[in-house]
Image (tube, helix red, strand yellow):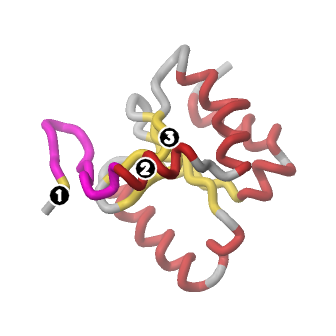
């Protein structure tokens, strides 16, 4: 098995390491927007934000270890029944690992970015 657990850290799947590098290089437009216009700035100040982080058997879009928060950017395909069930199971597993999962759609990020940022500020306690 290629999942390792270090001290109190989350399970890290070594098999996903190369895929995470590829995903970081090829972010979607909504991922780029939320990263470059919001998350990267807070990563340099209050706490570290990881992009495309392997946790267990998943790759989460963004992870803030200090706050135990996962931020997921969902494509429109996530709204069919199979994806909904997969996302629910994934969220349950991440919550079992004591993580809070915040989900935003591509449409929300691209069309209502101010609302997304306010929600993130509230969740991250940024004033």
Question: Quick one: SS at disc 3?
Answer: strand
Q: CA distance from mark 2 to mark 3?
A: 8 Å
Check the picture and name the quadrant holding the C terminus. top right
Q: Nearer the viewer, mark 2 or mark 3?
A: 2
Q: Which mark is residue 88?
A: none
* Magenta residue check for 12: yes
Residue at image x 26%, y 45%?
Answer: 10
The quadrant in which residue 8 appears is: top left
In the image, residue 76 sits, relative to residue 62, either above or below, namely: below
> Could you tell me which residue is drawn at 57 percent across and 31 percent down?
124
**Cβ–Cβ below 8 Å for labels 2 and 1?**
no
Q: Residues within 10 Å of mark 1 (few under 14, many from 20)?
A: few
Q: Is residue 79 left or right of residue 72?
A: right
Locate residue 100, reporting x and y percent. 46, 48
Q: Which residues are magenta?
A: 4-17
Q: Dot 2, crowdedness within 10 Å: few (<14), some or many (≥20)?
A: some
- Residue 122 at x, y percent in the picture: 65, 33
In magenta segment, residue 84 = no
Residue that mark 2 sits on: 20
Q: Secondary structure at mark 2?
A: helix
**Which residue has dot 1 on it?**
2
Instruction: Name the residue tied to disc 3.
Output: 51
In the foreground, 124 or 83: 83
Question: Would you say the residues marked 3 and 1 are in contact, meaning their CB atoms lie under 8 Å apart?
Answer: no
Instruction: Mark 2 or mark 1: name the one nearer the start of the chain.
Output: 1
Label 3, residues with CA under 10 Å away: few <14, some 14-19, many ≥20: many
On-image quarter of the N terminus? bottom left
Q: Is residue 31 left or right of residue 87?
A: right
């Amino acid at each position: 098995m290629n999942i390792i657990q270090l001290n109190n850290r989350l399970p890290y799947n070594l098999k996903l390491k190369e895929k995470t590098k590829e995903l970081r290089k090829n972010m979607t437009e909504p991922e780029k927007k939320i990263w470059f216009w919001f998350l990267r700035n807070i990563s340099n100040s209050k706490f570290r934000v990881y992009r495309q982080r392997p946790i267990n058997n998943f790759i989460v879009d963004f992870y803030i270890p200090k706050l135990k928060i996962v931020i997921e950017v969902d494509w429109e395909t996530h709204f069919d029944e199979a994806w909904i069930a997969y996302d629910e199971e994934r969220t349950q597993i991440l919550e079992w690992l004591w993580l809070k999962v915040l989900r935003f759609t591509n449409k929300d990020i691209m069309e209502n970015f101010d609302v997304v940022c306010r929600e993130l500020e509230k969740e991250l306690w940024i004033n």
